Image (cartoon, coloured by chain):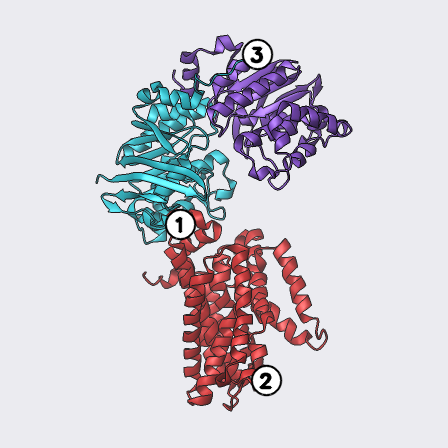
Chain colours: A cyan, B purple, C red
Amino acid sequence: MSRTLEASEIHKYFGGVKAVQGVSLTLETARIIGLIGPNGSGKSTLLNVIAGIEKPTKGTVTVDGRRVDGWPAHRMVELGVAKTHQIPKPFLGMTCRENVAVAMMYGSRREGEPASALEESRRILAMVGLDRRADAPASNLTVQERKRLEFARVLATGAGLVLLDEIFAGLSPDELRDAIALFARVQKEQGFGALVVEHVMRAVMILSDFVVVIEEGRKIAEGSPKEVVEDPAVIEAYLGSEATNVTP
Amino acid sequence: MLRLDGVQAGYDGTQVLWDVTLAAEKGAMTVLIGPNGAGKSTTLKVINGLVRPTRGHVVFQGEDITRTPAHERPGKGIAACPEGRRLFPLLTTEGNLRLGAYPKGARSSADETLTYVYELFPRLRERARVKAGRLSGGEQQMVGIGRALMSKPSILVLDEPSLGLAPKLVSEIFVKIRELREAGLTVLMVEQNAYAALRIADFGYVMQNGHVVKSGPPNQLLDLEELRKAYFAIP
Amino acid sequence: MKWPKLRAIGPSLWGIGVFLLVLGGLAPWIPRFPLTILVNLLIFAALAYSLNFITGLTGYVNFGHVVFMAVGAYTLGYTVGTIRLHPLGGVALGGLMALVLALGLGAVTLRFRGVYFAIASLVTPLAGLNIVLVLPALGGGQGILLNIGFDPLSWFYTIWAIIATEVGLTYWITHGRLGYGIRAIKSDEDAAKSLGVNAPRLKLFLFALSGLFAGATGGVYAWTTSGVFPEAAFDLTFSLRMLAMIVIGGMGTLLGPLIGAIAVYLPSRFFLTIFIGTESIIIGLVVIVIALFVPGGIVGTLRKYVPELRRILE
């Protein structure tokens, strides 16, 4: 089933700080959208608004035409939209399987039986390469393993649209290559649509079908990865304006 | 004067710096540029002592300071102006500046240094009695730099001084930083705004994904195509 | 949810079940004095189980739990005293009133997290006491004295039934889908929400259960003391004692509240004459030591260090 999430004209203010100012984007099943921008440009805030963690100050979010802005996160998950946390938040007292089983029972799959959820979670852990850690307590995982678990849990909710917050940060070049390949494979198998907030440009360039660039809360460019990195506005946002004159 | 040798570092098991080797020469202005997430700020934290490297060395004036705690570093002559300034919002401009003279060697000459800072930034003299929280972004940046100068450092370390400032203010601040360098101070600056930084630098390093990928004098680095490749990971 | 097959039921539930059945069968032959002590012990155990629903399972520390008990006690006192209701009816109504109060209170206070919830919960007994003191219908400062006789066996079977229901419900909740959602909330509420767990509703459900059983138990308590007295009904140290029981026994476990109730009640019942006045201090010290050094309580610690017991103790 094809799903479409549309965020239109999203504004989010915190007191006087205008974190997001009128950004629109569309996320669809089987497409990967990269969301990039310099530090503090409002990427994570926008992701939180779409995920139902923050309410937009202005603007709307719809899923398959239905207004969902202001919905709490757990209802968004029921609807099939789930987000990873930038800093992984595993349930430390539970094993990896149990962590995944929670997502399976409370996400859009609504698996009712713990026993079958626990069984099924093996398969999902295998998908992200954590099968050998299935029965280890989440508290024993390394940071990178926790990131994989975070991703596994989002998959386990059965979400057709996933929002990923910097899942490729902190990897060595080799690990990054493997992680990108793993993600591409899982995404192809599962066919979900993904909105990827990422600093690691290599991942964005390889994976994204479409890239949205924001700076200071505003969209400054969008298009294919190749297009946006040639866009003068994007180059200026990242490298600084050549017009910024400084006389030595 | 300051050298990093094969430094690796990170937070909570997430490695950010994979191999950073760089040097800031005495009396020169060195800049470290690169996209966000490249590890620039972490590199500065290694220099300040806020992040301890898991491998590699930090050498300052011939002394290995890899394990020197952060609070002892200003006393050795390393003054940092952190990203986002980190002023004390309820203290006045002057209060913030005077706190910068906390290291022993700087206390006795605090009044002289203060006069110097006010000469450098006349705007701050006018705003001396205003609480730092009420200053504009540009003024706060000046206080941040001034506070670092109050410790009479041998090296001034700046983290993204252009962050959140309008272009006109950026050039104003950068002119001042250049003045400091002209006056003989050693400066190490981290900037995302590559062009503005390289314009006033003597030497630059480009970082990407925790590595130093390129270094050289500004005219060698001011190549849009090359910088673009580094910033956007274009092969 | 299907009923679990008998064979699948864990040893802890079997153990408590057998213990309760034996106790229930023996009760008519237990002399009156020991029986009243047993009833008192079971009242504490029932309170501990009721607090376990919210504090044990979710980690939300409720210092105001005694309020539900007081509401149950006053409900019984009022209905039995004025409209001559049978005490059993008073117990049931008491539970119901406390449930309603819990829904109202919980809708507000459960929005707070951690220490803020705990502080908010501290206020409720003080508010409750001051309201009761100015209500003439509830006897004001005098309280309500009842003339309903001395009937330890009826008390016993009532509290027995309450505990059996609590234990059964605790088991059912912790062993199904709900249990996973609750553990997720206890571990990281934000992460639980972002995986689809409706945390506010689940917490309110547990808080309501907690109120229901504390209220019913409060009714039984008023029945055994033939009256309700405001200062005693809203006594904060009662809340602390219940907390001590689940902390000592093991928060969120099936056996913990029972073991904790025994561990707190019996010593305080028998040493009371020796350490008069210092009892609360001793309980307080024990709780601090346990919270610092053995946070799992008796059951949690045994499970941790004796792996063979993991399948047995829940």
Q: Does residue C209 appear in the picture of this structure?
A: no
Residue where numbered disc 3 is placed: B202
> Between tags 3 and 1, which lies in front?
3
> Between tags 2 and 1, which lies in front?
1
Residue where numbered disc 1 is placed: C193
Separation of residues labelled 2 and 3 (CA atoms): 93 Å
Separation of residues labelled 3 and 1 (CA atoms): 52 Å
Query: Which chain hosts label 1?
Result: C
Residue where numbered disc 2 is placed: C33
* x, y percent for residue C245: 57, 66
Q: Does residue A18 appear in the picture of this structure?
A: yes
* Residue type, numbered disc 2: Phe
Query: Which chain hosts label 3?
Result: B
* x, y percent for residue A103: 37, 47
Q: Viewer-proximal residue, B21 or A217?
A: A217
SS at badge 1? helix
Q: Is residue A193 above or below residue B199?
A: below
Q: Residues within 10 Å of mark 3 (few under 14, many from 20)?
A: many
Give the side of residue C223 with respect to residue A232, left or right. right
Q: Viewer-proximal residue, B225 or A210?
A: B225
Separation of residues labelled 2 and 1 (CA atoms): 51 Å
Q: Residues within 10 Å of mark 2 (few under 14, many from 20)?
A: few
* Residue type, numbered disc 3: Asp
Q: Residue at x 35, y 62 (%)?
A: C5
SS at badge 3? loop
Farthest residue, direction front: B126
Marks 2,1: beta carbons within 8 A: no
* Residue type, numbered disc 1: Lys
